[in-house]
Amino acid sequence: SRSGLSYEQRAVQHPNPLVKKLFAIAEKKKTNIVLSADLTTTNELLDIADRLGPHIAVLKTHIDIVSDFGPSTIEGLTELAQRHDFLLFEDRKFIDIGNTVQKQYKGGALRIHDWAHIVNASILAGEGIIQALDQTIRDGGVSERGILILAEMTSKGSLAVGEYTQASVEIAQKFPQSVLGFVSTKELSSHSRVASPDEDFVVFTTGVNLSSKGDALGQQYQTPTTAIEGGSDFLIAGRGIYAAAEPVTAVKEYQQAGWDAYQRRITS
Ligand code: S5P
């Protein structure tokens, strides 16, 4: 792991062009925030993306919750991602057999591969799912596409622990061209039996909130500081930011907390 280096140093050393771009954005905008923009209409989604775009490195969508989804949703997101320099992450949580997942990724009404730089997948069904997504990425004719493996979950009673999490790491290591890293609550290199010294998987951590410990449906939160101290590289936050009375003020607080914690980690 290279979690003790600056984003700039990691950008220089990383072999994957999409990860290089992600680290370069973090360094330039001084942010490790991934906004979980769980808004349910195109207008609300694009409005929050435009207002908070300058403060985030990645915008994470659940595109299937947008009630009026259509071409203008994607055109708007793509235009804002370029204008404010952030990446798009569709939180699709692919989980099916490889053949089905390829269709869900490339086709359907959502055409996720066309517009989302990053997607995530679970390994419940075995490594074929990652093989399938990897194949689509390598044959897809579009550069800058990657996968995060959902190696843990933040919800109470999650079964993605122990050997399951370890298997997530081992499958990631077999597909280094397209697996960028993990969605997990902490750094996972200790779960690997065969970590190579120059691998640098990126850790995205969800369940991040500055003022709440959880919700009524099992979500469990930690703070930006504890997440970064635990080895997280990018903080995924949703309601803590977009549902705040002043989302712009809130995103700046998360941005500062996440950035300061990362600087402390790499200088200590
Ligand atoms: O383990 C997980 C993985 C994910 S991707 N726990 C999560 O909460 N998520 C997602 O992160 C979830 O689907 C939601 O979009 C976001 C958390 O939102 P928040 O409002 O609780 O910050």
Image (cartoon, rainbow, N blue to C red):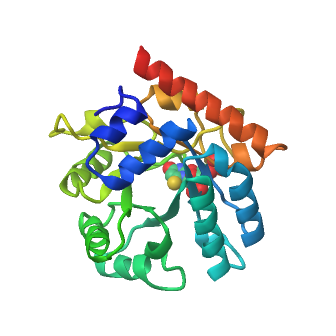
- Residue furthest top as drawn: 268
Q: Where residue 22 appears, x then y in whole percent? A: 44, 48
| Residue 212 visible to an observer of this rendering | no
Q: Residue at x 59, y 39 (%)?
A: 208
Left or right, 199 with respect to 95, comes to: left
Which of the image's four quarters has the C terminus? Answer: top left
Is 192 rendered above or below residue 264?
Answer: below
Q: Where residue 20 appears, x then y in whole percent? A: 37, 47
Left or right, 108 with respect to 10, comes to: right
Residue 48's quadrant in the figure?
Answer: bottom right
Q: Nearer the viewer, residue 27 or 192?
A: 27
Q: Residue at x 54, y 85 (%)?
A: 109
| Residue 53 visible to an observer of this rendering | yes
Q: Nearer the viewer, residue 136 or 210?
A: 136
Is 93 rendered above or below residue 250?
Answer: below
Which of the image's four quarters has the N terminus? Answer: top left
Q: Residue at x 70, y 43 (%)?
A: 240
Q: Where residue 21 appears, x then y in whole percent? A: 42, 50
Q: Where residue 212 appears, x then y in whole percent? A: 70, 36
Q: Nearer the viewer, residue 25 or 112?
A: 25
